[in-house]
Image (cartoon, rainbow, N blue to C red):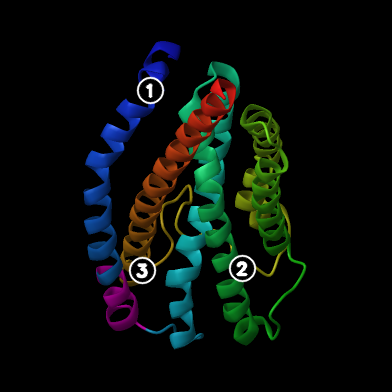
Amino acid sequence: MAIDLHKYANPKRFLAITSAIYPWSVWLTVILLLGGLYLSLFVAPPDYQQGDTVRIMFVHVPAAWMALMIYTLMAVSSAVGLIWKHPVADLTAKAAAPIGACFTFLALVTGSLWGQPMWGTFWVWDARLTSMLILLFLYLGYMAIWESFDDPAKAAKAAAILALVGVINIPIIRFSVDWWNTLHQPASVATMDGPKIHTTILIPLLVMGLAYTAFFVMVLIIRVKAEILKRRLRVLQIAELRES
């Protein structure tokens, strides 16, 4: 496994691969997002209880999926960076953090907007909501650690430790509605008995989820490239200082 990983540790090879993926991610983002919005707004029926308010779900639920997925990716990348000293893995985790934080913030805001007409309040200290708020703080803390060190190696190690410790929050978020009595509705897509919602709701939801994923890949590639170029510039500046 270490041999396979180190094949992609070369930034040039990594950039070549991501440059080939990037155009596809852009087109997929545009096509899936337009298709998902059309299905969500014009094809999916209003809920018999919630009416058109239910359409917030098509923004809220995929954002929550992405928040969990991105943090999990960060934790895996951090572990790879710690164990195999994979330089691109650390940069990938660093580049993914602000995107994950944005998705988490979007999930919290849309959840509050959805909760107000359903629960009569924008916020409750519900297990799911509280654990999602903790996830946002983990993202912000991870980014703050990267900015707190002048040495990128020390920053990567400290941030990786936080990412790995914080990953325990992911199953708590996922199973909080099953473990505790909460206001948040239980899982209705990924269940042991299969999806519990009608295809007219499920399909737009999945399309929006794919659109968010394609968007994440697109932005992540841009950010990782920027991090690699920043790292190269730092190396050149240090070399110039040593020569002078």
Q: Position of residue 119 (x, y in %)?
A: 67, 81
Q: Residue at x 41, y 66 (%)?
A: 197
Is any atom of residue 241 visible in this view? Answer: yes
What secondary structure is found at the residue carrying circle 3?
loop
| Residues packed near mark 1 inside 10 Å, few (<14), some (14 to 19) or many (20 plus) | few
Q: For this view, does 74 lie left or right of residue 176?
A: left
In the image, farthest residue toward the right:
125
| Residues packed near mark 2 inside 10 Å, few (<14), some (14 to 19) or many (20 plus) | many
What secondary structure is found at the residue carrying circle 2?
helix
Q: Is residue 39 located in the magenta-colored stretch of the structure?
A: yes
In the image, farthest residue toward the top:
3
Query: First in sequence: mark 3 or mark 2?
Result: 2
Q: Nearer the viewer, residue 194 or 132?
A: 132
Q: Nearer the viewer, residue 87 or 115?
A: 87
Q: For this view, does 64 lie left or right of residue 33?
A: right
User: Magenta-highlighted stretch: main secondary structure?
Assistant: helix
Quadrant (top left, top right, bottom left, bottom right) of the C terminus: top right
User: From which residue to which does the magenta span run?
Assistant: 35-45
Quadrant (top left, top right, bottom left, bottom right) of the N terminus: top left
Q: Amino acid at mark 1?
A: Asn
Q: For this view, does 1 lie left or right of residue 177?
A: left
Q: Position of residue 78 (x, y in %)?
A: 58, 31
Residue holding disc 1: 10
Q: Residue at x 44, y 57 (%)?
A: 189
Mark 3 or 2, closer to the camera = 2
- On residue 108, which mark appears? 2
Q: For this view, does 52 lie left or right of residue 169?
A: left
- Quarter of the image for residue 9 reads top left
Q: Residue at x 59, y 65 (%)?
A: 105
- On residue 198, which mark appears? 3
- On residue 151, which mark appears? none
Q: Position of residue 162 (x, y in %)?
A: 70, 37
